[in-house]
Image (tube, grey):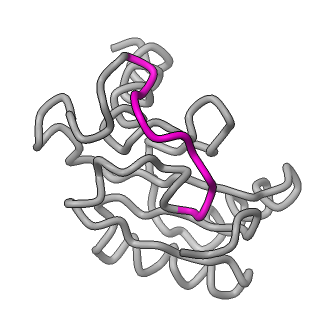
Amino acid sequence: MGRAGQETVLFYNLDNAKGRAIRVVLIQMGIRIRNVKREEFTEPVGKLVGMAVPEGVGEDGRRPDEPNTPDDLDDEMLVMYGFTEDRLDEFLARMRRARTGHVALKAVITPTNSSWNGHELYAELKKEHEALSGR
């Protein structure tokens, strides 16, 4: 595990050409990358970046080891941690300039969502994305 506070990006379902292009941008910026394996999707996102997060239940009352369904997280997702606003803006601008391809589901780890697992964060991001895109 990395040290808490270190800029880190969690890759969900990005073991592909787009993920490799994003990885180049992150390496150039000196940002830590962590590929999240499918069996780690039930782990709290904060734990994956080295935060101390309380064990137990997520926001909806489910324990982190009780995902909605095992296959509900199939889309690409980027989860960022430890970024200042300026560094986050720089990362997103560099992704656009490098034409890495669009990742619709992106989140920043906060005190509120740090105890959520990948499935919970994914469900929330999907809801927000669908609401914003009018679907």
Of residues 100 and 36, the one nearer the viewer is 36
Residue 108, placed above or below residue 26: above
From the viewer's side, name the closer residue of 48 and 134.
48
Q: Nearer the viewer, residue 41 or 104?
A: 41
Seen as rendered, the residue at the extreme front is 55
The image shows residue 10, relative to residue 55, as above or below, that is below
Name the one closer to the observer, 89 or 110. 110
| Residue at image location 35% in from the left, 58% down from the top | 12
User: Is residue 52 covered in magenta?
Assistant: yes
Whether residue 64 is in magenta: the answer is no
Where in the figure is residue 134, as x and y percent of width and height? 41, 12
Query: Number of labelled discs?
Result: 0
What segment carries the magenta color? 49-60
Q: Main secondary structure of the magenta part?
A: loop
Determine the residue positioned at 42% across, 25% down: 124
Q: In which image quadrant can residue 15 be found?
A: bottom left
User: In the rendered view of the protein, which quadrant contains the C terminus?
Assistant: top left
Decide if residue 117 is on the left or right side of residue 6. Answer: left
The quarter of the picture where residue 63 lies is top left
The residue under the point 46% across, 41% down is: 55
The vertical placement of 22 against 80, above or below, is below
Residue 85 image offset from top left, x and y in percent: 85, 49
User: Taking 6 as reference, is 42 left or right?
Assistant: left
